[in-house]
């Protein structure tokens, strides 16, 4: 019997010859089409039917039976983005205004929104699920573009200075992909005077070579001493 785990619950596939399966597979609820039927068998929770659905956007989503039967669930979550896009268009924030919907920059913006808002997104667990979001202004691509177009180049990617912070103009910068990979391998975060930032950012803000700070820390200096301009005696 096929079993799957989803959002900390355990589900068992309903056999193909059972009415709860073949009566529903292929049914539609707005953007969703039922692909498989499952029964929740999590200990301590009611045994309820769920449907594994394929959304028109290509994502899959496990939906409670009533959500399909009563057509209360419209999509994997992309429907909200479509509605927001229509609202944006009515407010003048349409593709005809910025003409950038096929650019790499537009795709970067879309990935930010997706990883923060869409539980079905591949990286959601590392972003939205951790409470990481974005500046409400950035729901509009035009305003994201207004804030972040300076300094952008095709060989660059967006990076948050504080990995626990949100996506916003103050916390984001453009770096080359090589720099981003190096940062992921070698990034050191230091907490000083109530703020937590990358070592390289402290170095930039304080005017101290990052190599000097690293050397001081290796010699056993405290963070406070390592981040002081003058050598401590």
Image (tube, rainbow, N blue to C red):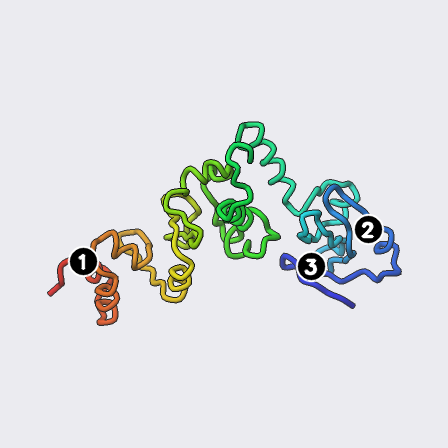
Tell me the tag on residue 174.
Answer: none
User: In front: 24, or 177?
Assistant: 177
Horizontal arrangement in the rendering, residue 51 relative to residue 201 (left or right): right
First in residue order: circle 2 vs circle 3: 2
Horizontal arrangement in the rendering, residue 78 relative to residue 11 (left or right): left
Q: Which residue is mark 3?
A: 44
- Quarter of the image for residue 122 reads bottom right
Q: Which residue is mark 1?
A: 228
- As helix, strand or loop, the secondary structure at mark 2 comes to loop
User: In front: 44, or 34?
Assistant: 34
Q: CA distance from mark 2 to mark 3?
A: 30 Å
- For discs 2 and 3, the disc positioned in front in the rendered view: 2
- The residue at 50%/48% (across/down) is 104
Give how far across and how far down residue 74 sits, in percent.
70, 42
Q: Is residue 82 visible?
A: yes
First in residue order: circle 3 vs circle 1: 3
- For discs 3 and 1, the disc positioned in front in the rendered view: 1
Q: Which residue is mark 2?
A: 26
- As helix, strand or loop, the secondary structure at mark 3 comes to loop
Give the class, few, some or many, for how many residues have Cα within 10 Å of label 2's Cα (few <14, many ≥20): some
- The residue at 22%/72% (across/down) is 219
Instruction: Note whether 152 is above or below 99 in the view shown.
Output: below
Mark 1 in CB contact with mark 2 (< 8 angstroms): no
Give how far across and how far down residue 91 sits, in percent.
54, 27
Instruction: Note whether 114 is above or below 12 in the view shown.
Output: above
- Quarter of the image for residue 220 reads bottom left
First in residue order: circle 1 vs circle 2: 2
- The residue at 69%/44% (across/down) is 75
- For discs 1 and 2, the disc positioned in front in the rendered view: 2
User: In front: 42, or 32?
Assistant: 32
């Amino acid at each position: 019997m096929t079993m799957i785990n989803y959002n900390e619950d355990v589900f068992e596939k309903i056999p193909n010859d059972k009415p709860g399966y073949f009566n529903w597979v292929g049914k539609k609820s707005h953007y969703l089409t039922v692909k498989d039927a499952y029964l929740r068998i999590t200990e301590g929770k009611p045994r309820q039917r769920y449907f594994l659905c394929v959304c028109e956007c290509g994502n899959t989503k496990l939906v409670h039976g009533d959500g399909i039967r009563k057509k209360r669930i419209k999509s994997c979550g992309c429907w909200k983005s479509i509605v927001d896009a229509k609202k944006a268009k009515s407010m003048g924030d349409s593709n005809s205004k910025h003409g950038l919907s096929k650019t790499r920059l537009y795709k970067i913006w879309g990935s930010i929104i997706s990883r923060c808002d869409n539980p079905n997104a591949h990286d959601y667990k590392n972003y939205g699920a951790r409470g990481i979001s974005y500046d409400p202004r950035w729901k509009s691509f035009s305003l994201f573009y207004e804030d972040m177009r300076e300094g952008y180049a095709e060989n660059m990617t967006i990076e948050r200075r504080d990995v626990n912070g949100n996506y916003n103009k103050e916390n984001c910068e453009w770096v080359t992909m090589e720099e981003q990979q190096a940062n992921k391998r070698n990034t050191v975060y230091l907490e000083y005077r109530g703020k937590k930032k990358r070592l390289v950012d402290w170095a930039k803000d304080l005017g101290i070579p990052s190599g000097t700070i690293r050397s001081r820390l290796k010699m056993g200096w405290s963070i406070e001493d390592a981040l002081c301009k003058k050598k401590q005696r």
